[in-house]
Image: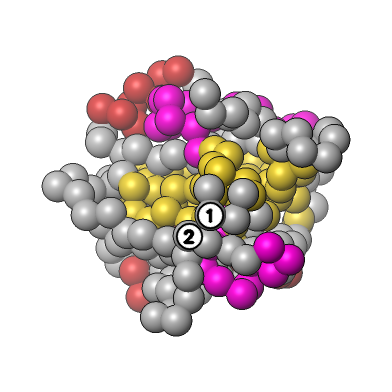
Amino acid sequence: MKKTNPLLRLTLPSAAVQRLRKSGIYCTPSITIEFQQATKRHVLRGRESGGAIKEFGHYVSFCREGGERLPWFVRPDSLTSNGDHAIVLAPVLVSVEALRVNHTYELLIARHELRAEKEGARPRIQSQLVFRGWQGQLPLDLVAKDRSVAGKIAPEFFTRAGEARQLPAQFVEAVQAVTAAASCLFCSHSHFLIKPQASSAPVVLPKGKDSSAASVDGDIGIETSPVTANAAGSRP
């Protein structure tokens, strides 16, 4: 049975979850642990997914620890939109998740890695909060009128006292991409994961080599509710 990670995902009220489902938006920020038989090693598996309708959107993508783009392992074709767009496999993943309601945004950036309690034991997912933004503001219509700047701009986040909070510099590009994706009507494509090079080997990572040597980038997914999310961080 797959181990799932219950931590560090946006917390959504049940009413919001139901509304997202009713609108056909299926964002899956969860991650799973997978085992590669050829190399006898575990990796993380993530699913870039989500999309938007005019009023709201929900999207998640993944990147490296330094914010660099990751190559996807596979891009599944689908008869529907606003669902899964690409699968990524890697030993370490950083998830970037955003929820948009008109011009207000919730944002969560988290780092995920595999940790084993002892040599030879099955590893567990250890997640660390990188950034949590509440009620960020972006008074632009990225769905239509201001679509030309989508992917080049991100919401502004503030403390309870009204002071600006800076996004982690290395993840600004990823946040901008996910912000655009949360306004992408009936989305059917990947916004941040990139096409793997023809010479890369996305499924098998040789022992002793890091994830940059191949397109295998971790995959940590939860196969249950596609939009249910858990709490992360403390509200300012």
Q: Residue 213 lies in what quarter of the image? A: bottom right
Q: Residue at x 76, y 55 (%)?
A: 165
Q: Amino acid at mark 2?
A: Val
Task: Report whether residue 96 is seen.
Answer: no
Q: Is residue 169 left or right of residue 226?
A: right
Question: Can you say whether 47 is above or below 206 in the image?
Answer: above
Q: Are marks 2 and 1 in contact (CB under 8 Å)?
A: yes
Q: Residue 213: within the magenta?
A: yes
Q: Residue 63 lies in what quarter of the image? A: bottom right
Q: Residue at x 34, y 69 (%)?
A: 147
Counting from the top left corner in percent of width and height, residue 214 is at: 55, 71
Q: Is residue 213 left or right of residue 80?
A: right
Task: Report whether residue 194 is seen.
Answer: yes
Give the residues drawn in magenta, as a range. Answer: 207-236
Q: Residue furthest right?
A: 118
Q: Name the quarter where the C terminus is drawn.
A: top right
Query: Spatial distance from mark 2 to mark 1, Cα to Cα?
Result: 9 Å
Question: Badge 2 is on which residue?
Answer: 203
Question: Can you say whether 144 is above or below 104 in the image?
Answer: below
Q: Is residue 37 left or right of residue 23?
A: right
Predominant SS of the magenta segment? loop
Q: Residue 222: within the magenta?
A: yes
If you read the primary sequence from the N terminus, does the residue marked by circle 2 or circle 1 appear first?
1
Q: Residue 188 lies in what quarter of the image? A: bottom left
Counting from the top left corner in percent of width and height, residue 231 is at: 65, 28
Q: Amino acid at mark 1?
A: Ala
